[in-house]
């Protein structure tokens, strides 16, 4: 009888391409389990260094060193963090209004080796969606006008801008 040399923790399913790791803040000892792509670990030659931004596990930013078995081997505090478009007032407001875990995971962006936490993404997505819908409606009007320009009255307020710019009407 042949026995497998795979350990019980070896993952042999190709569809499970994410790993869960428990991170512990080296400053305040807060714990959180985070999910990330296994490709981050697989592509590293040795230890993978992961930067945990403030607000993801706790209010501190730190780095975690993870081995090929998805085991945290150590942590390093970050002494200074450059903030991108975040004022002290927003940071304080964020600390006072901590969100639940589901909302935190909704704001995580995991793409290949890229991990980002973006709590303003929903607002940005709504603005982008509205802009796309506006562009669609403008494009639709232009297509409609170009198809039926000779039948559209010159006083039509909906197509007034297109009528002014149309060289065919002169």
Image (spheres, grey):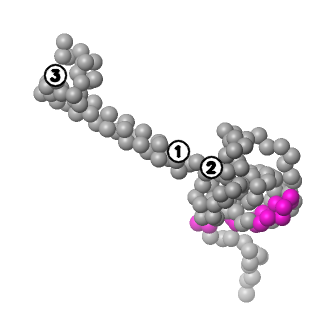
Tell me the element at label 2: loop
Residue 46: % across, % down: 83, 54
Q: Badges 3 and 1: C-beta atoms under 8 Å apart?
A: no
Dot placed on the residue nearer the N-terminal end, 1 or 2: 2
Front-most of residues 170 and 157: 157
The numbered dot on residue 124 is 1
Q: Is residue 128 magenta?
A: no
Q: Residue furthest bottom?
A: 1
Magenta segment, which residues? 14-31
Front-most of residues 1 and 53: 53
Image quadrant in which the C terminus is located:
top left
Where is mark 2, residue-wise? 118
Instruction: Count the labels in the image.
Output: 3
Q: Quadrant of residue 130?
A: top left
Q: Badges 1 and 2: C-beta atoms under 8 Å apart?
A: yes
Dot placed on the residue nearer the N-terminal end, 2 or 3: 2
Residue 43: % across, % down: 73, 53
Q: Badges 2 and 3: C-beta atoms under 8 Å apart?
A: no
* Residue shown at 47% from the left, 43% from the top: 127
* Residue shown at 72% from the left, 66% from the top: 33
Camera sees residue 115: no
Classify 10 Å Cα crowding around label 1: few (below 14), some (14-19), many (20 and above): few
Residue 1: % across, % down: 73, 87
Where is mark 3, residue-wise? 154
Front-most of residues 17 and 129: 129
Camera sees residue 75: yes
């Amino acid at each position: 009888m042949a026995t497998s040399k795979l350990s019980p923790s070896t993952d042999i399913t190709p569809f499970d391409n994410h790993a869960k790791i428990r991170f512990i803040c080296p400053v305040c000892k807060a714990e959180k389990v985070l999910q990330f792509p296994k490709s981050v670990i697989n592509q590293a030659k040795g230890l993978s260094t992961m930067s945990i931004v403030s607000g993801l596990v706790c209010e501190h930013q730190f780095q975690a060193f993870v081995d090929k078995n998805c085991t945290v081997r150590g942590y390093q505090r970050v002494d200074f963090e450059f903030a991108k478009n975040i004022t002290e007032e927003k940071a304080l407001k964020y600390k006072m209004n901590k969100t639940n875990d589901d909302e935190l995971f909704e704001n995580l962006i995991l793409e290949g080796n890229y991990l980002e936490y973006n709590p303003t993404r929903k607002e940005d997505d709504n603005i982008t969606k509205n802009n796309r819908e506006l562009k669609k409606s403008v494009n639709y009007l232009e297509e409609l006008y170009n198809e039926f320009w000779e039948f559209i009255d010159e006083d039509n307020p909906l197509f007034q801008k297109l009528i002014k710019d149309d060289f065919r009407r002169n």
